[in-house]
Amino acid sequence: MNSLSKLLKTDTISSRHVTFEFVRALWHLRSLFGMLLLVFFALCAAIFYLGAPMDSATHAHASFGGTLYFCGVTALTIGYGDVVATTAIGRALAVVLGLYGVLVTGVTTAVAVFAVQRAAGRAA
């Protein structure tokens, strides 16, 4: 025990155990995350074909890679604005993608919290 652990009368858990529990929990949820990834790529394809994403700097139609970048930035609710959807359906799909990203982030955070709790429980 280090001095802080002695002062607080707690044991510390190693990051290796937390990582192991996180990967273990993700492995058990692999079908869920696979489905979430499939839906993400389906939304990306829909935005690419229906949303007419455009690069703001060059005003050119964005490539599929640029659309994937746009979808990732939108799903993480960062929104740089360098690639934008130009049609009404594309903007609506971007809103759906943003809400979907909040869902995926919440599930991933819940798995991380579960992993920390499980590692702490095993250390005790």
Image: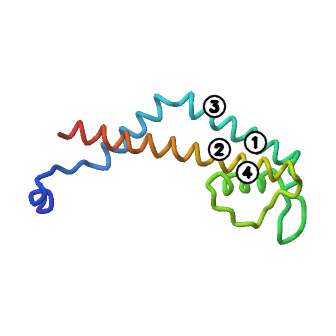
* CA–CA distance in space, label 3 to label 1: 12 Å
What residue do we see at 72% from left, 52% from top? 71
Picture coordinates of residue 39 (x, y %)?
69, 36
Secondary element under disc 4, as helix, strand or loop, is helix
Task: Give the amino acid at mark 4.
Answer: Val
Q: Which residue is under mark 3?
A: 35
Where residue 79 sits, quadrant-wise, is bottom right
Of label 2 and label 4, which has the lower sequence position?
4
* CA–CA distance in space, label 2 to label 3: 12 Å
Task: Relative to 28, say whether 123 is above or below.
Answer: below
Q: Is there CB contact under 8 Å for labels 3 and 1? A: no
Where residue 120 sits, quadrant-wise, is top left
Task: Relative to 80, say whether 45 is above or below.
Answer: above
What residue do we see at 40% from left, 40% from top? 22
Secondary element under disc 3, as helix, strand or loop, is helix
Q: Is there CB contact under 8 Å for labels 2 and 4? A: no
* CA–CA distance in space, label 3 to label 4: 20 Å
What residue do we see at 63% from left, 31% from top? 35
Of badges 3 and 4, the one in the foreground is: 4
Task: Give the amino acid at mark 3.
Answer: Met
Task: Relative to 84, say whether 34 is above or below.
Answer: above
Marker disc for residue 57: none
Picture coordinates of residue 58 (x, y %)?
87, 70
Q: Is there CB contact under 8 Å for labels 2 and 1? A: yes
Q: Which residue is under mark 1?
A: 43
* CA–CA distance in space, label 2 to label 1: 10 Å
